[in-house]
Image: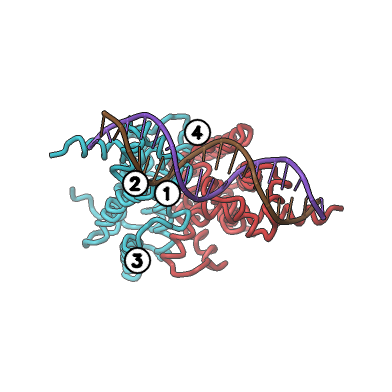
Chain colours: A red, B cyan, C purple, D brown
Amino acid sequence: MSSIRERNKDLILRAASEEFAEKGFAATKTSDIAVRAGLPKPNVYYYFKSKENLYREVLESIVEPLLEASAPFNQPGHPADVLRAYIRTKIRISRDHANASKVFASEIMHGAPHLSCERTAQLNAQAAHNIACIQRWVDQGLIADIDPSHLMFSIWAATQTYADFDWQISTVTGKASLSDDDYEAAAETIIRLVLKGCEIDEPAAAD
Amino acid sequence: MSSIRERNKDLILRAASEEFAEKGFAATKTSDIAVRAGLPKPNVYYYFKSKENLYREVLESIVEPLLEASAPFNQPGHPADVLRAYIRTKIRISRDHANASKVFASEIMHGAPHLSCERTAQLNAQAAHNIACIQRWVDQGLIADIDPSHLMFSIWAATQTYADFDWQISTVTGKASLSDDDYEAAAETIIRLVLKGCEIDEPAAAD
DNA sequence: GTCTATAAGCCGATAGAC
DNA sequence: GTCTATCGGCTTATAGAC
């Protein structure tokens, strides 16, 4: 097995995630990616053909995790459990895939010019599904009469912010990086806002 | 008074806001700004000296509104009223200064490389003040025991998202742009999450 | 003050030796 | 498969005519 190939591709992808997250697509130089990866620049082109290709790979790497985060909405469950699980997973993505998450956010901010139509469609379909699910809860009287779309926007924003605006969060909290406890506190706060805001009755704690 | 000068500067600033918001600093070409402004490119340099200068002017234009949005925290008031006013103003900024707001968000995402230290310090000081204010409410038992920093992060994120991720919001809602009613619904949703989430007792409606 | 025409430099991409 | 050395295009910025 060409383990050198795998190792180099991985080094480049990792370096690219960091550079793209830090500076954005246009401001990132492939030479900087090469330096960060500890490899000569032509290797970047050898493995990925072009800067845009490399960028797309970083971008696509976050779509699957994002889609999977909606899994709780795809199976029956109490609203409180579904929303809690969703928020926790979204926060975990912001922590564990911070760079790709930021690249994704930047891409969306600029109108998703590099995201394939399939991916866009998948993400939209999942979003529509989640919103419909919340609307059903409202109709069934399981949660308060809240606008499902705006609720989703708030959850997305509140969870994504820990990846996207890490600089602001570091500056305000005075911590260079957040600890596990900080992420836990973030998740708890968002879960609290959402569950209380929707006036969701907690299911009997059976576990 | 040189009204041509004022008019041209304004045309360029407006065009620049749109271009920078759409593509980001590095991906924006000064020639595109000139075309959008309906003026020859050298005019851009004549009035603003450099691309970076022009960018900084767009960026700085949003700082004052953002600082003023925190005004409710700077005078005594019931938590419900303060938070409601703050959220409404932040949503209004996302609507009325959508482009500059997006430019600001992109700048923060990339570590604020163009923001002056004074501005950064001002924004931080105001943030610290707001958070301390919320902490006092908690200590006085006026609101539930919630983490003030994370509450602020959620409010920032949920309100900013209407400027930053307008593409996503358009795609999901199927509307090219949001109406006044949509912004009203957004504000109501966020206010609801925050007030209920903090278990704030509403003050008697005196107005 | 305005604009055409051009300079200067940077960066993505590759040819070709090893 | 790897890397040095270089090209070519694109974009910021300006010189200089009007």
Whichever of labels 4 and 2 marks the residue nearer the N terminus, that label is 2
Q: Position of residue B66 (x, y in %)?
A: 31, 53
**Which label sits in the foreground, 1 or 4?**
4
Q: Residue furthest right?
A: A1
Q: Are marks 1 and 4 in contact (CB under 8 Å)?
A: no
Q: Amino acid at mark 1?
A: Ala
Chain under callout 1:
B
Q: In this picture, is B10 found above or below B70?
A: above
For the residue labelled by badge 4, is the local secondary structure a helix, a strand or a loop? Answer: helix
Q: Are marks 2 and 3 in contact (CB under 8 Å)?
A: no
x 39%, y 63%: residue: B144
For the residue labelled by badge 2, is the local secondary structure a helix, a strand or a loop? Answer: helix
Report which residue position mark 1 lands on. B158
Report which residue position mark 3 lands on. B128
Report which residue position mark 2 lands on. B54
Q: Nearer the viewer, residue B12 or A64?
A: B12
Chain under callout 3:
B
Q: Amino acid at mark 2?
A: Leu
Whichever of labels 3 and 1 marks the residue nearer the N terminus, that label is 3
